[in-house]
Image (cartoon, rainbow, N blue to C red):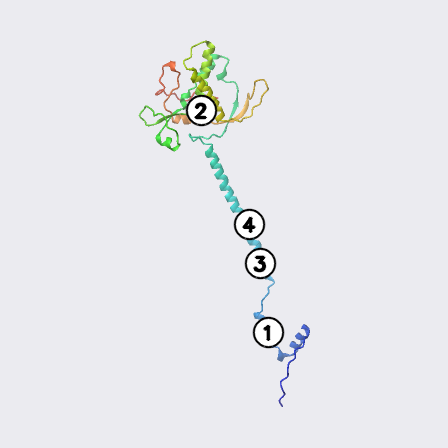
Amino acid sequence: MDFPPRKRSFVKVSMEESYDDDQGSSDQYDVSKALLAASSSPRISNRGPKSRKTWLKHNTVTTLLIFAFLVIAIESIYIVEIQRRANRRFLGPTGLSHERTVSRTIYAHSKYMSNDEEVASEAWDEILAGHGVIALNADYVAAKKLPPSVSLLDNSGNFMYVIEAYHAMHCTKVIREHYILMEQGRAWNWSRPHDMHCFDALRQYIMCNIDDTILWTNGHRETGHGQEKKCNDWDALRAYAESKSANYFDVEPEKGIMHLDNYHAGDGLTW
């Protein structure tokens, strides 16, 4: 006996009622459709967010470490470059460092200020400022961009130059000798303009080569005696001048000694 198809009516029921109804009616529960629906629906894993957090955590640390290493590397390069430029600024045309590295006791009593004038004058006479007269070849002159100077007369093709520290020493020596001769009432063969040149050369030398050492004083024209300070390496300058010697001897006009071809080892200077 045929029955007409039953019309389905949709009635709002609770989730529990719907679930119980489906479980109780096997003919209305399609397993394949349920599985298909389950496989096609978005899968939410409890491990997903935790895995992403762990990944972010590890990669953040790695990124920060890489960034820190880059900063350290850049700073190291920057510091090395600053030091290189500073060192280059402290190098003169001789290639010697102008950094003060040698400890000296300043204004201590020395033979140059002996109360015995013979001893003092002998010490000053031993100073050979001509040690600072040097011979440089054309390549050296070009590399250091030095101004033109007189050619040596020895057919070497070298040019003669004077190291300024030795020129200042020459002026100091000349002025002292002039003072002693005046004190003794003896004749002086250098002209007055030369003395004035030396006075002003020393003024400029002091102003150009600033020494900012701070000295103690007792307020009675005594200052810095026995104080320790850092100085440039005069021995290194002497050695450089020795290696570039122009075979020149610094003498006074009346002594009748040729300047050139009269080499003397060392400059006679001690601290």
Q: Closer to the N terminus: mark 4 or mark 2?
A: 4
Identify the secondary structure beneath mark 2. Answer: helix
Give percent across and percent down for residue 147: 39, 29
Q: Closer to the N terminus: mark 1 or mark 2?
A: 1
Identify the secondary structure beneath mark 3. Answer: helix
Pointer 2: what residue? 165
Pointer 4: what residue? 64
Identify the secondary structure beneath mark 1. Answer: helix
Which numbered disc covers residue 231? none
The image quadrant of residue 191 is: top left
What's under tag 4, amino acid-wise? Answer: Leu
What's under tag 2, amino acid-wise? Answer: Ala
Marks 4 and 3, Cα distance to the nearest angstrom? 18 Å
Q: Closer to the N terminus: mark 3 or mark 1?
A: 1
Marks 4 and 1, Cα distance to the nearest angstrom? 48 Å
Identify the secondary structure beneath mark 4. Answer: helix
Pointer 3: what residue? 52
